[in-house]
Amino acid sequence: MNCVESKRYLDLFLDGELDVETNLKVLEHLNLCPPCSKVFEGERWLGGEIRSRLSEEKAPAELVGRLQQAIAREGIAASSRRWGSVASLAASFLVAGTVAWAVFFGPDPGSQLHASPVSASTIAEAAARRHDSLRDTVPAEGLCVCPGCTDRPKEELDAWFSKRNASTCHHPMDKLGYRWKNGSMWRDGVRGRAICWTTQATQDRTLVSHASLPATAVSREGGEKRCIGSSEVRLFRVGPRVVIVGGDEGYT
Amino acid sequence: MALERSSGPGRGTFEELALPLADVLYATAVRMTDPASAEDLVQETMIKAWRNFHTFESGTNFKAWIFRILTNTYISSYRKKSRAPVVYDFSEVDVAQPDDEVRYLDIDDLDSIKERLGDDLKRAVDRLPPEFRLVLLLSTLGGFPYREIADIAGVPIGTVMSRLFRARKLLRQELGAARPEGRTP
């Protein structure tokens, strides 16, 4: 290989795009030819200089903040509006940003039973209001039940909540694959009834709330009917929030 | 009732992949258009990427994927606001042409060159025709191999090579021409 040839391969060589054989031939020539070696060195230096100069332009700090906000504001991606399967349902309400999900267990022996059902839409409104008041943050006051903080989350939640409310409830969060973050229990009121409210961040750091209401019945009216597996839930849109209200009383 | 964890992509995954690329996307955008438009371009790119994240194949090259979105967005919306006006057309250059007539930088001179280069480098890059400039940026800032630049820019690999080499040749001429008279190469 002569000097003219080697310089022809300069760009390809510096870009690492040469095949092994040609690459070796270029290297051999550079070894034997100081002038070409200088040229290659200079060009390599220039390439690096261009890269570092142009890389000096960093994205303005506010831009990154705006990007995060813009991403958070974006609605559910069209393809994740698949409500037929459990997994997609989870994706959609995670992607929606802050979502409140109300879960209702059966009657709690320790609680005061109420005769009249609570309407799902009332619960949805309360859930959305709760998140508004939280301003999409996890409440500072609360009990962290992440695996790093306790290996007896159920017991600790029991103890914590029982000081605040006679009735306690548990959410099988581990099955949902959530990463715990400041799980907190709140006593709140929906028409005078206590709500157990847990707020946490999901694995992809979306804020999700779960509320449990000891109740004999939840009226399955209002909202949009959806299915999670074999269960039927109701979906409400309250402002920018998506609230899913369901129960485990054997909906058909 | 228990819900299974979503197997679909989530916002956190997207942010982990995308936000660290904000700097390099911006550094590229700001050489293609003015700073304010560059911010808009990056933002628009991020939103589009997020909206289409469900189409991204996990395990494939996310950086190349988002740069393709940046490039397409630039071409469709921002090209008219290009940093430097296109003053001439160019034709594909035969890669095999020898470059004996081009003066290369003298590495013995590096310190004084470096001192003198200052903003000359950025200006020289900005003066490249946009098609050349884009390919150079994808190579230099993006670090993409030719094959990926071809995918991102939507041109054949031969075009990538000829534009890239011509861009560098032009840069050498610009920077070489900026040298004071009487300097021995």
Image (spheres, grey):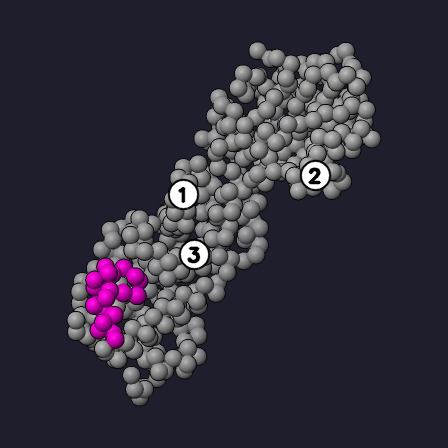
Snapshot quadrant of residue A46: bottom left
Q: Give the residue at x 59% y 19%.
A: A233
Q: Secondary structure at mark 2?
A: loop
Q: Are discs 2 and 1 located on one and the same chain?
A: no
Q: Is residue A221 left or right of residue B172?
A: right
**Dividing the image into 4 quarters, which one contains the N terminus of chain B?**
top right
Badge 2 is on which residue?
A150
Q: Tell me the CA gap for discs 1 and 3.
A: 26 Å
Question: Percent x, y for residue A206?
Answer: 59, 38
Residues rendered magenta in the picture:
A13-31
**Mark 2–mark 3 CB contact (< 8 Å):** no
Which secondary structure is most common in the magenta stretch?
helix
Tag nearer the camera, 2 or 3: 2
Tag nearer the camera, 1 or 3: 1
**Dividing the image into 4 quarters, which one contains the C terminus of chain B?**
bottom left
B124 w.r.t. A68: above or below: below
Badge 1 is on which residue?
B59
Q: Tell me the CA gap for discs 2 and 3.
A: 47 Å
B71 w.r.t. A98: above or below: below
Q: Is residue A34 left or right of residue A246?
A: left
Badge 3 is on which residue?
B29
